[in-house]
Image (spheres, grey):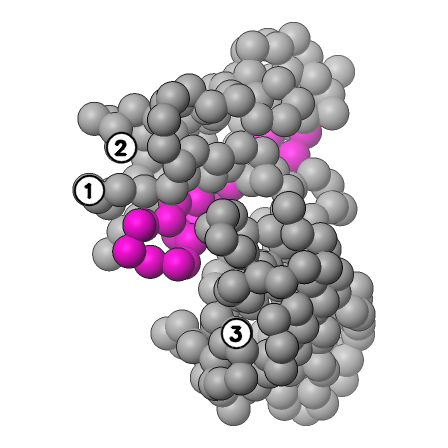
């Protein structure tokens, strides 16, 4: 299984600012994903991070708001731009390899004031 | 569009009771099936998965799940729960033609000591 770390683990940010979340995997994975999990709710896929090319966004999520980078097979970043209180959530990174099993990072708990 | 249904949003049991959490999905083709668990304050962990073969799969901590293709179901079971099983449980399904996971809404399980 892959071990996934995320930084920061939590942050409190002001409205209108941006936060970049980092995700590091300990081994090469084929796919990397970014999710949002509102308190008490299930996971919502934001986008699939593609190595060396633009991420694939799900309906309701756009690149200008959630720019994603994936410069190599083991690292990705998600930026939450121009934040508002509605962006307060837990942001999760996951990765999957040839086994098609997704493994998750510990999440980043974001609070926007 | 495919969907995943978890029948119970909240389940409260006493220690040593038997557990069964329901999961049904709507896709008619080949699927990979997963149960994840999220303990309070912790990140999502893989509990068990089914890809092919024996439809009864065993996971960590004494959990098992049975894939019944005719019922489009993948119910999670444990014969005797412990207080430490208090957590949220998520069922997820992956179509063979897609790399994304489709998530159920989750079931919050509370075990009374």
- Judged from the image, the secondary structure of the residue bearing numbered disc 3 is strand
Q: Nearer the viewer, residue A13 or A10?
A: A10
Residue A15 visible at all: no
Residue at left offset 19%, top offset 42%:
B28
User: Pointer 2: what residue?
Assistant: B72
Disc 1/disc 3 C-alpha distance (Å): 28 Å
**Quarter occupied by residue A95:** bottom right
Whether residues under marks 2 and 1 lie with C-beta atoms below 8 angstroms apart, the answer is: yes
Query: Which residue is located at x 48 percent, y 85 percent?
Result: A54
What is the number of the mark on residue A96? none
Q: State how far apart marks 2 and 3 are (Cα).
A: 30 Å
Tell me the tag on residue A49: 3
- Residue neighbourhood size for the residue with mark 2, other residues' Cα within 10 Å, grouped as few (<14), some (14–19), many (≥20): some
**Residue under the image location 62 percent in, 62 percent down:** A28
Q: Which residues are magenta?
A: B86-109
- Residue B106: x and y, percent? 50, 41
> Is there any visible trace of residue B74 in the rendered image?
yes
Q: Per the image, is A57 magenta?
A: no
Q: Residue at x 43, y 33 (%)?
A: B50
Left or right: B54, with B61 as reference point:
left
Subunit ID for the residue under disc 2: B
Q: Are marks 1 and 3 on the same chain?
A: no
Q: To which residue does mark 1 refer?
A: B28
Indicate which disc, 2 or 1, sits on the residue closer to the N terminus: 1
Residue A102 picture location, percent across and down:
54, 52
Discs 2, 3: same chain: no
Choose top left, top right, bottom left or bottom right for residue A18.
bottom right
Coordinates of residue A103 in the picture (x, y in percent): 60, 51
Asked which secondary structure carries label 1, the reply is: loop
Identify the subunit bearing mark 1.
B
Give neighbour class at mark 3: few <14, some 14-19, many 20+ (Cα, 10 Å). many
């Amino acid at each position: 299984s892959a071990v996934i770390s995320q930084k920061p683990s939590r942050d409190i940010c002001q409205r209108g600012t941006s936060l970049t979340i980092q995700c590091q995997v300990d081994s090469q994975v084929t796919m990397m994903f970014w999710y949002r999990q509102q308190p008490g709710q299930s996971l919502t896929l934001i986008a699939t991070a593609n190595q060396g090319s633009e991420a694939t966004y799900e309906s309701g999520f756009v690149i200008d708001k959630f720019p994603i980078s994936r410069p190599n097979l083991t690292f990705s970043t998600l930026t939450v731009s121009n934040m508002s209180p509605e962006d307060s959530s837990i942001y999760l990174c996951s990765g999957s390899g040839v086994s098609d099993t997704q493994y998750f990072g510990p999440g980043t708990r974001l609070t926007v004031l | 569009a495919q969907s995943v249904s978890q029948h119970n949003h909240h389940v409260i049991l006493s220690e040593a009771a038997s557990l069964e959490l329901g999961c049904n999905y709507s896709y008619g083709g080949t699927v990979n099936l997963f149960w994840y668990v999220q303990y309070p304050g912790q990140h999502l962990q893989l509990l068990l998965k089914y890809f092919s073969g024996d439809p009864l799969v065993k996971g960590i901590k004494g959990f098992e799940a049975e894939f019944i293709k005719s019922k489009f179901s993948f119910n999670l079971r444990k014969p005797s729960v412990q207080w430490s099983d208090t957590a949220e449980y998520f069922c997820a399904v992956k179509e063979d033609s897609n790399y994304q996971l489709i998530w159920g809404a989750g079931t919050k399980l509370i075990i009374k000591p």
